[in-house]
Image (spheres, rainbow, N blue to C red):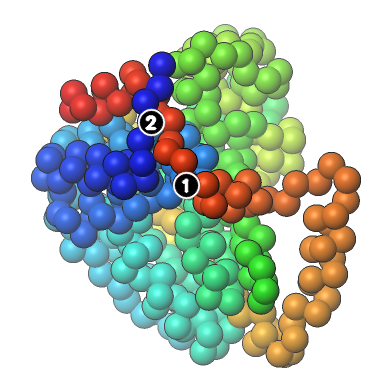
Amino acid sequence: MKNSLSLEDIYNLAYNTLTKVGSCSEQAKAVAETISRAEQDGSVSHGLFRLPGYFNSLKSGKVNLNPNPSLHKVSKAVLKCNGDRSFAPLIHKLYLNELIKSTKEIGIGILSVQRVAHFASLWPETETLAESGLIGIACTSYLPVVSPFGASEKLFGTNPISFAWPRKNDHPVVFDMATSSLALGDVQIAARDGHELPVGTGIDANGNATTDPNQVLKGMLLPFGGYKGSHLSMMIELLAGPLVGETTSDITEENNIDDGGPPLGGQFILAMSPNIISGLDDWDKNAEPFINKLSNLKGVRMPGKRRHINRTSLENIEVNSDLLNKIYSL
């Protein structure tokens, strides 16, 4: 069964749940906004579904109730943030504008983030950059739930990556995807709702292929596209771990408090100015014909299109009743 909630209801539910456990208002607002935007966009696995995990991470003390993050300008192009055990949306709210400002001055910029708990989609970061006229790439790692290609042992996180391309007269082109065959949250929802998974999603604890989400959760996910997805996942482990001064997923797990919420780790965010790098004011003159041709091909749906359609809806959001009862009981 499902209940119908407005976006305001969803925001208030998230905000009140987080402040009830003791989170400072600024952090609760940032997370509540991220959750309500995910629900509006139709990203069920990253909306209210994540709220119990956020709550538990605060309750266990893994995530700071009242964090004091800091930003250090390492060079003209590199900003380094210590999140002080905060949730990542707070860092984005505080410091993405600093990244935008420095990138517009010199053409390229990196926000290197440590000591944050990232439990949301990545598109809010990259879309924000693209809406400011910049190209954005962001990635983060997680706990080991994915076996590298050819192996039957977990080592990688789901390790999502997002890319956003700005457009002068239209919505930016944005994709956000896990490098696993399926996002972990989608597997968890399939298990909750009693749905089977597509063939090739994962294997059970004995290394046998299965479409049962419960068995995949006990076993492991596979990378998408075989060795290609596996290599991309490896890249993200290194970019969002050692490069930003954090650990890879396997070491993150050793240090993690298993409270059902996100681990503490790092995030790598890259911004680029298309007009400075191309040297052209009309930097989009070669991009727009290509994007238009791609979007007009029969059978093609451009990434992010469904999100923007969902944002025009004035209807309430349908939310799983069992999930709401779980949230109310926290």
Task: Give above or below for 208 relative to 30.
Answer: above
Residue type beneath disc 1? Leu
Q: Is residue 46 left or right of residue 281?
A: left
Return the residue at label 1.
Answer: 314
Q: Secondary structure at mark 1?
A: loop
* Observer able to see residue 39: yes
Question: Within 10 angstroms of label 2, few (less than 14), some, or many (20 or more) residues?
Answer: some
Point out the residue furthest to the front here.
314
Task: Give above or below for 183 relative to 245.
Answer: above
Task: Give above or below for 92 relative to 257.
Answer: below
Q: Earlier in the sequence, mark 1 or mark 2?
A: 2
Residue at 40%, 75% in the rendered image: 97
Q: Is residue 4 left or right of residue 22?
A: right
In this view, the residue in front, 221 or 253, is 221
Return the residue at label 2.
Answer: 4
Q: Distance between the Cα atoms at labels 1 and 2? A: 12 Å
Where is residue 147 shown, x and y percent of the image? 59, 28
